Amino acid sequence: MEHIHLSVFIVVAICRCQGEQHFSSSETLHFKFANHKWMKKIQDLPLSAISIPGTHQSNRHSQTSPPAFQAWGLHNQLDAGIRFFDLHVTSSNIQYVKTEGVQESETFFYAFRTLQTFLVKHRKETLLLRVTPDEGAVAQVTEWLSRGDLPLWRDKDVPTLGQVRGKIVLVQSSTLNLGLPVHVTELDTEKDKKETQMKENIKLASQNCEHDMMLTYTGSKGGSEEPLEIAKTLNKQVDDYLLELKGDTNRPHCVGIIAMDFPGPKVIQTIIDFNGKLGYMSKKLQDTDVAVPETFESDGKEEKTGNHPSEDNKHPSEDHKHPSEDHKHASEDHKHPSEDHEHASEDHEHTSEDHEHASEDHEHASIMNIHLKIMNIMNMHLKITNIHLNITNIHLKITNMHLKITNIHLKITNIHLKITNIHLKITNIHLKITNIHLKITNMHLKITNIHLKITNIHLKITNIHLKITNIHLKITNMHLKITNIHLKITNMHLKIRNIHLKITNITNMHLKITNIHLKITNITNIHLKITNMHLKITNIHLKITNIHLKITNMHLKITNITNMHLKITNIHLKITNIHLKIMRIIHQMNMNIHLKITNIHLKIMNITNIHLKIMRIIH
């Protein structure tokens, strides 16, 4: 079961990687990215107003003669969602002739049959075809495309999608005047200017595509340029620019036909997605990315909840009133010494004899001021005591936090022990898998040796088969010669009766040769059976190789788990060090604060003793 999950994971990862590609260098297309029916969901708009992905030099792919402009053949291009095809036809590759220079998959007739077969299966789709024949092929291609029994649109007026579903729409080229006229833009050969020129060409197409057919080539012109290397960079730039246009507030509704070299699933899907919500393109308001406004209930809730802080803020203002009232009491108490001082001055004016008494009252007033200051200091002492209590509470909270951290530390330690046990179990499993891996490797080597032996036998049988085939060809030639002689002898049979006996003997020899031919045919059948056995052994060898790869992947995963375990251990050590540092800092802070408070308390006690002494002196 674990092997199955691992295989599914690997397949999904490969699919995601291929789905993110802007270019494709692989000859195969994964089924996950097949897009056979995307035009079925689009309404019957003018064909020019639809954004269509296409390929440049469509029939020059990796399985044909170089240079190659595409990785996929025509079948894979159709399956991936390509709907515009560009064919360059010469007089030598119109139809297939057994020559060394041209393959059947490069020919015009092969490409046309492939497109026609696709439309038979998918009648809601339409394909656009631009054929550029050379001078020697113009007449023959024009005659073929003018046939009335072909599902073609040859008119020059832009049709709606509904008019051409299930048909091939011809697009005019420089040498073929059949079909729709199109405005074509190509890129310059200078590599530095390609991105800027590509953006300008697509922008121009987006401004005119609602009424005119627009074709933008983003591929290489050939020559010294390497199409694949240019496609690796330029296809991503095309994708990024289309996403930028789509995200613009004044986004266009179409970009016309974009023909590319080596397109990947990502850029093809971006062009298709530029058509907006498929089936709703005619409604331009729905095509734009308009955000739906939220309800006003959430705003009302925020306004309601916003009142609470203002109500809470009333309490501090009321609390601030208490210090002002305390200050009033202190100022009223402070007035008493001044009144006594005025009373002493008035007594001094009435009589000079009471001057000493007035001076004593003045001293008494100054002592009362000192007393008030001492009271203020006592209030400060009370505040400091409160601060000390708060600090003690904070210290208790920190101690509780410390206990909690210690508990967490114990839990982490337990987890660490569990992970260690798991690690040991995984290590044991890893050893077992390694042993299995070694056994499978040995089996793989044995099977490889058997495979090599069978291959050698197969080569020997192939050589024998070739020799028998040569003998068969020689006998066949002899048979043809004897047949010719037999015809001549038959014509001469009426004139030369004496030769009849010789001809009869030759006929008997012919029958013997025919029997030898039948025996050679039986040997050929035996050879085919041996070839089938060889293919079955090869398939078994491939399956064992796949099992070997899966076990190797499991081994890599176990190694990753071991690395994660080491990382967790390092994090655990770091947390322990941080915890020790925090405890040291808290302990030092508590000791310093406690010493400072103790010093302040001693000073206050000294001031209190001085105060008591002064009070004793006054009494």
Image: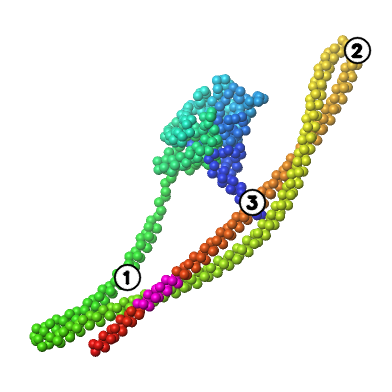
- Which residue sits furthest top? 495
**Residue ranking furthest to the bottom:** 619
Sooner in the amino-acid sequence: mark 3 or mark 2: 2
* Quadrant in which the C terminus appears: bottom left
Task: Answer with left or right where residue 385 lies relative to residue 21.
Answer: left
Q: In which quarter of the image is residue 315?
A: bottom left
User: What's drawn in magenta, residue-wise?
Assistant: 586-600
Cα distance, mark 3 to mark 2?
84 Å
Task: Please tell me whether mark 1 or mark 3 is closer to you in this view.
Answer: 3
Identity, as a three-letter code, of the amino acid under mark 3: Asn
Quadrant of the image containing the N terminus: bottom right
Question: Does the residue at mark 3 contact the one at mark 2 (Cβ under 8 Å)?
Answer: no
- The mark found on residue 553 in the picture is 3
At numbered mark 2, what does the secondary structure look like: helix, strand or loop? loop
Q: Is residue 530 magenta?
A: no
Label 2 to label 1: alpha-carbon separation: 144 Å
Q: In the image, residue 351 lies at what x, y percent?
A: 9, 86
Q: In this view, does 335 lie above or below 22?
A: below
Q: Using the image, determine if residue 385 lies above or below residue 22.
A: below
Marker disc for residue 498: 2
Q: What number of labels is visible?
A: 3
**Main secondary structure found in the magenta portion:** helix
Front label number (3 vs 2) = 3
**Residue 146 placed where, x, y %?**
56, 23
Whether residue 244 is visible here, answered yes or no, is yes
Residue 37 in view here: no
